[in-house]
Image: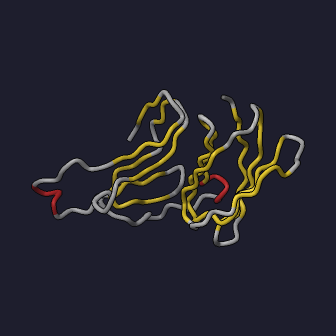
Amino acid sequence: MGYKTQANDTYSLRIDHLDGLFEGQDIFIEDKLLNLIHDLKQSPYVFTSAAGTFNDRFVLRYTNNALGVSQPQLSDAVVAMATNGKLTIQASEPIKHIFVYDIAGKLIRTYNPAMVRNYFEHDFNYSDGVYMLKIRMQNGVIATQKLMNKK
């Protein structure tokens, strides 16, 4: 399933209504970037995206099994962006700590989210430039991301 967006932002996929065969059918969305499968009948799927055209990020599924798909490296399963003074991170595992470094490697901020979950958003009022993020997941795995902040 493809989509096109003109802005770095948070979006959602949802089912408007069901009838006929689909009332009793499970319906899932697979996010191939984050290696997540979400039940669309339970709730909308909320995700962040950079601007652009993405033709192969999502797959509409009727089972929740990954059927022989190998697990990607966790560092490939994290999306981070700074837009309009907000830092937004979405990951395939719950986020425990976030460390923000400037381009010189100096630690400038540590975030310890009050709730451990796969999504994090917070004010990011730093100057334009490149930043490095070290994201520690609840399971102990560490992912790194480069981040460009431009207002």
Q: Residue at x 68, y 63 (%)?
A: 112
How has the structure been colored for display?
secondary structure
Q: Residue at x 57, y 67 (%)?
A: 115
Q: Say whether residue 132 is left or right of residue 35.
A: right
Quadrant of the drawing holding the C terminus: top right
- The x, y position of residue 114, in whole percent, is 60, 66
Is residue 90 positioned above or below 52 on the image? below
- The x, y position of residue 85, in whole percent, is 63, 37
Q: Say whether residue 128 is left or right of residue 22.
A: right
Single out the residue that lies furthest toward the bottom.
Answer: 139
Q: 46 or 25, which lies in front?
A: 46
Q: Quadrant of residue 142?
A: bottom right
- The x, y position of residue 87, in whole percent, is 63, 45
Quadrant of the drawing holding the N terminus: top left
Q: Residue at x 47, y 48 (%)?
A: 47
| Tally of numbered discs | 0
Q: Quadrant of residue 94?
A: bottom right
- The x, y position of residue 4, in whole percent, is 43, 31
Q: Say whether residue 87 is left or right of residue 69.
A: right
Q: Residue at x 71, y 35 (%)?
A: 148
